[in-house]
Image: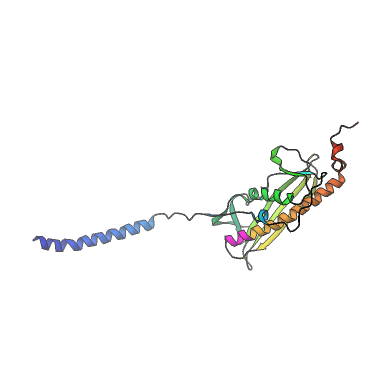
């Protein structure tokens, strides 16, 4: 067979082989696992950035000092997952949206900031600092979830707070704060905005509650009413 005739026979087969190679390559690539989309992370911080509706009350010299324990969380709410609920008692997590930290750890500085603005305490410190204090505040996240079903979704936030006399370990105040906020959109971001509003509302209630409880404690504690005499030895 002459060379030109051989080329005429060979070129169609070469083109067919090249086309088959492209098809096989594209088919194999579709079978490879695709890279997971990066998770979006969100924070609870609006309670810290929003200005207080009323100016703080000047702190009195006889006001108690407060120790704030690290916030705990009920099972199911102690991770960075953003929780949502479609069926009662069934907790689910968004696949590509998370909190930047656990809600309990994000709440700790918000609690200190909110309570500190009331002027009801002479000083506020972490209970892990080793500093002595008059009162101790324990908090626990009972729920923080976006709830779907029966209309627009909403976020529900429940926080349990216990205020105790640090010397006697006696509980002087106990309360659960429960707030809901409507979500502007049916997605994780809408829930995050609503969660920040609910948290802000609870922080305002918690701060007022702690200041009022501290005032009642001070009125019922003779040593607190006159701290100068409290450090003097009994005769």
Instruction: Name, please, the residue furthest toward the right.
Output: 235
Viewer-proximal residue among 102 and 65: 65
Q: Position of residue 185 (x, y in %)?
A: 59, 65
Q: Position of residue 78 (x, y in %)?
A: 62, 49
Q: How is the image coloured?
A: rainbow
**Quarter in which the C terminus is drawn:** top right
* Region in magenta: 187-193
Q: Is any part of residue 85 visible from this angle? A: no
Instruction: Name, please, the residue furthest toward the bottom.
Output: 151
**Count the marks: how many?**
0
**Quarter in which the N terminus is drawn:** bottom left
Q: Residue 96 magenta-drawn?
A: no
Q: Quadrant of residue 21?
A: bottom left
Viewer-proximal residue among 117 and 42: 117
129, above or below 205, in the image: above
Q: Position of residue 3 (x, y in %)?
A: 10, 60
Dominant secondary structure (helix, strand or loop) of the stretch shown in magenta:
helix
Left or right, 226 with reference to 67:
right
The residue sitting at 76% across, 53% down in the picture is 56
Q: Is any part of residue 204 visible from this angle? A: yes
Viewer-proximal residue among 183 and 132: 132
Q: Position of residue 137 (x, y in %)?
A: 74, 46
Q: Quadrant of residue 83?
A: bottom right
């Amino acid at each position: 067979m002459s060379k030109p005739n051989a080329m005429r026979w060979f070129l169609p087969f070469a083109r067919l082989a090249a086309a088959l190679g492209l098809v096989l390559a594209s088919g194999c690539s579709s079978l490879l696992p695709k890279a997971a989309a990066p998770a979006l992370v969100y924070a609870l911080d609006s309670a810290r950035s929003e200005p207080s509706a009323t100016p703080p009350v000047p702190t009195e010299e006889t006001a108690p000092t407060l120790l704030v324990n690290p916030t705990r969380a009920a099972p199911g709410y102690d991770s960075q997952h953003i929780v949502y609920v479609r069926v009662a008692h069934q907790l689910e997590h968004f696949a590509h949206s998370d909190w930047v930290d656990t809600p309990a750890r994000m709440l700790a500085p918000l609690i200190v900031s909110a309570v500190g603005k009331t002027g009801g305490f002479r000083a506020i410190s972490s209970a892990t600092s080793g500093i002595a204090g008059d009162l101790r505040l324990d908090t626990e996240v009972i729920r923080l979830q976006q709830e779907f079903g029966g209309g627009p979704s909403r976020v529900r936030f429940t926080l349990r707070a216990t205020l105790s006399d640090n010397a006697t370990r006696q509980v002087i105040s106990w309360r659960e704060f429960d707030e809901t906020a409507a979500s502007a959109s049916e997605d994780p971001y809408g829930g995050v905005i609503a969660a920040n509003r609910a948290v802000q509302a609870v922080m305002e209630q918690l701060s007022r509650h702690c200041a009022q409880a501290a005032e009642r404690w001070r009125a019922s504690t003779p040593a607190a009413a006159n701290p100068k005499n409290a450090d003097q030895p009994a005769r």
